[in-house]
Image (cartoon, rainbow, N blue to C red):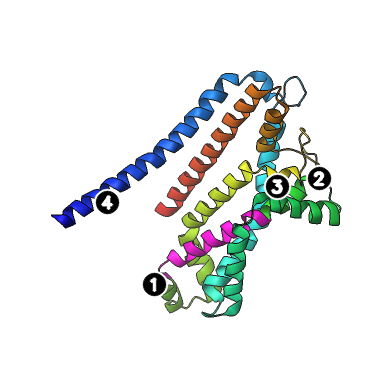
Amino acid sequence: MRKRFGETLLMGCTYVAAALTAGVLLSLVGYVLIKGLPHLKPSLFALTYTSENVSLVPALITTVLMALCSLLIALPLGIGAAIYLVEYARRGNKAVAWIRMTTETLAGIPSIIYGLFGMLFFVTALKWGFSLIAGACTLAIMILPLILRSTEEALKAVPDLYREGAFGLGAGRLRTVMKVVLPAAIPGILAGVILAIGRIVGETAALIYTAGTVAQVPTGLTSSARTLSVHMYALSSEGFHSGEASATAAVLLILVLGINGLSAYIARKISRR
């Protein structure tokens, strides 16, 4: 009886915790949508930003470009490092322990520190100025530990039977990794990419010091621009367009939910194949 009571109690606590988590998420999403959707209007989707329409389209385009540039830099480095750690590095290697300690340390650094580093190194030392490339490089460093750790865990989750079967058929290590291990680990890798995109889209502090706050579509990698999160921060801090700031938050939330849903759909398709 005591054992059954303990199991029932733990099961009840689990359901309560799950319900609270789902409730917090739904309440947050509902609050943002209720506050923001009524303020959506056609002027917010004008192609050019002015002080009258405070259009979010340039910031939306900049957000997409910033995410693409950051992922183009961070994905090869993160996935390549994870492949080395899991597939090539020897057990007990001091370099492996040092790399893992470094990534865990980087994951715990506040974003404002990344912003100050990006301003001092990319903006000032390299003389890139407030630009899209400076912000993308800063965000790439920020999301690199996340991509590396998620890819590493995804590779570890692939059964060793896959590797042994490939080796038994005469495949080399590189072919085994590229043709057998990586395809099986793609759903886990995509989960890390989703989290990385969410951090890129929602980042503000690091981009203020590196990409700037110019509310126009960037004409090149050296152009200054603002993302949706920076745009929302600028509108709310000015105090003149609080409704438009809430509408921007709603668009930002819808964008993140859409990216997560599309990534989950792609991951399911790949898993079925």
Answer whether residue 159 is magenta in the image.
yes
Does residue 67 appear in this view?
A: yes
Q: Are marks 1 and 3 in contact (CB under 8 Å)?
A: no
Q: Which residue is mark 3?
A: 206
Q: Does 4 appear above or below 241?
A: below
- Quick check: 48 left or right of 3? right
Q: Name the quadrant containing residue 42.
A: top right
Percent from the top left, x then y, of residue 162?
Answer: 42, 70
Q: Which residue is mark 1?
A: 161
Picture quarter with the C terminus: bottom left
User: In terms of secondary structure, where does tag 1 sit?
Assistant: helix
Residue type at mark 2 is Phe
Does the residue at mark 3 contact the one at mark 2 (Cβ under 8 Å)?
A: no
Residue located 44% across and 37% down the image: 24
Q: Position of residue 147 (x, y in %)?
A: 57, 57
Q: What residue did someone put label 2 on?
A: 130
Horizontal side of 143 relative to 136 (left or right) equals left
Question: Mark 2 or mark 3, which is nearer the start of the sequence?
Answer: 2
Q: Residues within 10 Å of mark 2 (few under 14, many from 20)?
A: many
Q: Which of the two discs, 3 and 2, sits closer to the camera?
A: 3
Q: Residues within 10 Å of mark 3 (few under 14, many from 20)?
A: many
C-alpha gap between disc 1 and disc 4: 36 Å
Foreground disc of the pair 2, 1: 2
User: Nearer the N terminus, badge 1 or badge 4?
Assistant: 4
Per the rendered image, the range of residues in magenta is 141-162
Mark 4 lies on residue: 10
- Which of the two residues, 240 or 248, is positioned nearer the viewer here? 240
